[in-house]
Image: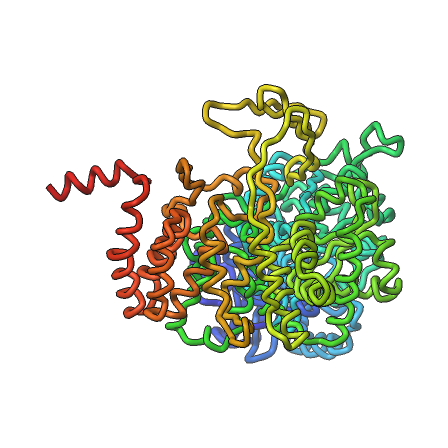
């Protein structure tokens, strides 16, 4: 352990004189001015580096610790107190502890308040008679100190950790930093929960801090898998780093328990071997301290199945510990009630009575804006319309998209900028296949994909699990056990690829923590079945494919990739009959009959049951509460849309150039698909459980249908595919645009117009000029045949022109 010179400014005059006088008095045989002193110094506890600032301590406590050097060798640790303050045994203990952890060890400790002086031998803690030391005495002490036992260093660490909040705070912070560092991904390991230099700001962290400030002893951060609960605890560590009232210790939940994990961390990081009982005693000591900051123990990944850990959390938040120990736990929301409920299922458990619950969902508007700004600071930008993409509100997807860019060699160029699509696209699967090449991992995820496909078609599962599985990759343990052995499942959990939990339905499930890799393997699995069905009955294959897309998360993207995979598998290209069957499965409007009953899943409330009444209003029931959704003038609450998954799949297919053999000639089919799907008279978007993302700024035009307003940006996959086509083809797309304008379809012309507007904003110079020509020419002429969508803007433009 090496002491480092950290002094960066002159010593303060108010104790300079006292210090020099004490040195002269204690060491009269040393020439005046020969003793060098460090007011700021550092030492190591194991892997932790601890800094001591004598100036700050003197201002705050009236006591400064100073290292005195004779040449390059430590002479003594001087514990200098403000004049008038009495010398105590604690002063001696602290000085001895500092002396023992220095390397080389300081042989003496001098404690003084300017009037009284005590000199203590470091190696045995014995006091010398008088306030003056002779040179011969000093030589004998140095010889004895060289034989000091290592146990003295451990005792010194124990003293500093027990009596000095400044020291143990730094130690705790560095333990947290080490644990978080182990959970931060590298370029090759994406199973870990954190990304270096990327942390989303969440409102839930502010809520946790508010509970801690109010004195609450236990806070539960609850939310669905992959929503960012671990990152909230990481952000808590960051926010309390400079907070004098709190310091956060980050620990992973595990079989060893919180206190044993604390003892292990102290031994590993601080070279301070302590037993579980000693670690518990240290916690009790800190929990009752009046002058120290509150220690917040952040436990990541708690599961109700961890019965021993549950008992320990109950103990930590009981009266056995003082108020200066607080606990924050991350837990899946499906398991929170199992954690907080009593044994009889009716009353609350002790944890339930003490806990304050902080829900965590997808990024809200403010959080998403902050995330976009965070990415922008790294030269990564989203296309306009991204704020309306539900999938982009999930932290795991943002992290996946960002990490691929940061890992690119092109990113090292300071002029490089990346523009991300405004919605979920096939690029997610392509990036996963580039990133994950480990053969064994791919095999295991293929088995996960098989198990999930079996689950997706199993209608005997509990309905809450069916509904939630439409948006999250959840697999029942008993189903997975038919594909993988217990050791393989345990290994996937231990490596962070799966998260085991208990669903609210009571089923033991695992959540997949690499959704992009599972999506890739699901696409491959769907491709196998699609190839088999397409060879015998393309119409049946198309119907099955649309059903698969409706049953799995990211279904439209996965199934679109499966079509490409099937074409590559058979080496026959895209089967034209399959494409035709998908095109013929046009979206349809349906009306709900009075008495119809529906169910949906909401992140906020879980399962929601819907009943349609005679007057067209809808009764929503969730969580024991009932809400009436009244029908307003002109609102079609009873109108639903069906058969849209086929065209969603085609929307993604059209984003990539593709061809097939038609009557002996290879024809490009992506422009054909764009002309047909682009004419859809409904807003073509994957529905979700939140009205926020289902409601898009749009125009309802009688006789033409519903079209997205250009002010919303690109919010449909088909419009994004058009943008990619026009950007790729440039002026070669003139004939396609002219055909789109001739067809007399307002939705088709309007989508083309939005794509061209984006090409003007972001395309190469020649492409932007071409887009402007098309907008000012055939597109504006075609739009004149339809009702004006923004009459107020047209009137303003006319007035301005006149």
Given residues 617 and 219, the one toward you in this image is: 617
The residue at the far front in this view is: 663
- For the C terminus, the image quarter is top left
| Residue 646 in picture, x, y percent from top left | 59, 53
Q: Furthest-left residue in view?
A: 802
Res. 95 visible in picture:
no
Place residue 755 in its image quadrant. Answer: bottom left
In the rendered image, which quarter is residue 615 located in?
A: top right
Q: Vertical placement of 607 versus 453: above or below? A: above
Q: Nearer the viewer, residue 598 or 146?
A: 598
Give residue 723's position: percent from left, percent from top: 41, 61
Give me the residue at 70% from left, 38% from top.
217
Identify which residue is drawn at 69% across, 74% down: 137
Task: Classify 628 as above or below 193.
Answer: above
The image position of residue 669, as x and y in percent, is 50, 66
Residue 613 is situated, as x and y percent measured from the top left of the image, at: 63, 22
Residue at screen point 32% across, 69% down: 731
Which of the pair 276/379 is nearer the observer? Answer: 379
Judged left or right of residue 719, residue 506 is right
Residue 575 visible somewhere in the drawing: yes
Residue drawn 68% across the image and 51% down it: 547
């Amino acid at each position: 352990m090496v002491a480092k010179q950290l002094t960066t400014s002159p010593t303060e005059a108010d104790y300079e004189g006292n210090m020099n006088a004490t040195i002269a008095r204690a060491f009269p045989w040393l020439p005046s001015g020969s003793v060098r002193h460090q007011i700021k110094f550092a030492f190591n506890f194991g892997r932790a580096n601890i800094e001591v600032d004598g100036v700050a301590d003197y201002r705050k406590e009236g006591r400064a610790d100073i290292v005195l050097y004779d040449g390059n060798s430590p002479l003594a640790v001087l514990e200098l107190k403000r004049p008038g303050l009495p010398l105590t045994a604690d002063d001696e203990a602290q000085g001895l502890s500092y002396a023992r952890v220095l390397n080389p060890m300081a042989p003496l400790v001098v404690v003084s308040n300017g009037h009284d002086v005590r000199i203590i031998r470091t190696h045995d803690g014995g006091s010398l008679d008088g306030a003056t030391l002779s040179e011969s005495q000093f030589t004998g002490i140095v010889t004895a100190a060289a034989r000091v036992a290592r146990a003295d260093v451990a005792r010194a660490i124990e003293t500093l950790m027990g009596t000095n909040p400044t020291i143990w705070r730094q130690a705790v912070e560095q333990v947290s930093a080490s644990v978080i560092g182990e959970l931060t991904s590298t370029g090759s390991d994406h199973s870990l929960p954190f990304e270096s230099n990327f942390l989303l700001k969440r409102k839930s962290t502010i809520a946790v801090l508010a509970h801690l400030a109010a004195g609450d002893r236990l806070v539960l951060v609850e939310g669905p898998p992959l929503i960012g609960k671990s990152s909230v605890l990481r952000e808590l560590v960051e926010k309390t780093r400079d907070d004098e009232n709190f310091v956060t210790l980050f620990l992973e939940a595990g079989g060893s328990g919180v206190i044993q994990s604390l003892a292990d961390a102290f031994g590993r990081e601080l070279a301070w071997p302590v037993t579980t009982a000693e670690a518990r005693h240290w916690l009790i000591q800190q929990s009752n301290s009046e002058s120290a900051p509150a220690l917040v123990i952040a436990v990541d990944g708690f599961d109700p199945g961890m019965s021993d850990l549950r008992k320990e959390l109950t103990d930590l938040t009981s009266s056995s510990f003082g108020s200066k120990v607080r606990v924050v736990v991350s837990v899946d929301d499906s398991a929170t009630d199992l954690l907080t409920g009593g044994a009889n299922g009716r009353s609350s458990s002790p944890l339930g009575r003490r806990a304050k619950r902080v829900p965590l969902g997808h990024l809200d508007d403010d959080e998403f804006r902050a995330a976009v700004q965070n990415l922008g600071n790294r030269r990564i930008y989203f296309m306009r319309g991204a704020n309306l993409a539900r999938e982009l509100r999930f932290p795991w997807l943002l992290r996946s998209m960002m990490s691929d860019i940061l890992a690119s060699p092109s990113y090292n160029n300071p002029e490089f900028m990346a523009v991300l699509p405004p919605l979920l696209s096939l690029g997610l699967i392509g990036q996963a296949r580039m990133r994950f090449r480990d053969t064994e991992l791919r095999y295991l995820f293929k088995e996960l994909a098989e198990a999930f496909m079996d689950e997706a078609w199993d209608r005997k599962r509990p309905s809450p699990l069916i509904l939630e599985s439409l948006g999250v990759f959840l697999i029942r343990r008993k189903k997975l056990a038919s594909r993988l052995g217990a050791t393989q499942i345990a290994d996937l959990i231990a490596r962070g690829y799966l998260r085991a939990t208990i669903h609210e339905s009571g089923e033991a499930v695992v959540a997949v923590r690499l959704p992009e890799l599972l999506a890739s393997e699901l696409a491959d699995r769907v491709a196998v079945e699609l190839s088999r069905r397409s060879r015998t009955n393309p119409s049946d294959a198309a119907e099955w494919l649309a059903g698969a897309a409706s049953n799995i998360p990211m279904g439209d993207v996965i199934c679109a990739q499966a079509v490409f995979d099937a074409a590559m598998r058979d080496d026959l290209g895209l089967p034209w009959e399959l494409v035709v069957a998908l095109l013929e499965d046009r979206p349809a409007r349906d009306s709900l009959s009075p008495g119809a009953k529906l169910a949906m899943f909401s992140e906020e409330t879980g399962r929601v049951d819907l009943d349609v009444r005679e007057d067209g209003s809808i009764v929503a029931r969730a969580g024991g509460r009932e809400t009436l959704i009244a029908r307003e003038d002109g609102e079609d609450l009873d109108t639903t849309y069906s058969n849209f998954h086929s065209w969603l799949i085609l929307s993604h297919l059209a984003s990539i150039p593709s061809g097939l053999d038609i009557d002996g000639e290879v024809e490009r089919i992506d422009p054909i698909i764009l002309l047909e799907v682009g004419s859809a008279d409904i807003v073509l978007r994957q529905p979700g459980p939140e009205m926020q993302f289902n409601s898009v700024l749009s125009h309802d035009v009688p006789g033409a249908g519903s079209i997205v307003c250009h002010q919303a940006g690109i919010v449909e996959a088909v419009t994004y595919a058009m943008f990619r086509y026009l950007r790729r083809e440039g002026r070669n797309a003139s004939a396609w645009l002219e055909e789109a304008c001739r067809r007399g379809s307002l939705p088709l012309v309007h989508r083309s117009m939005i794509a061209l507007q984006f090409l003007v904003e972001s395309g190469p110079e020649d492409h932007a000029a071409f887009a402007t020509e098309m907008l000012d020419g055939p597109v504006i002429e075609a739009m004149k045949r339809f009702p004006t969508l923004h009459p107020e803007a047209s009137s303003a433009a006319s007035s301005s022109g006149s």
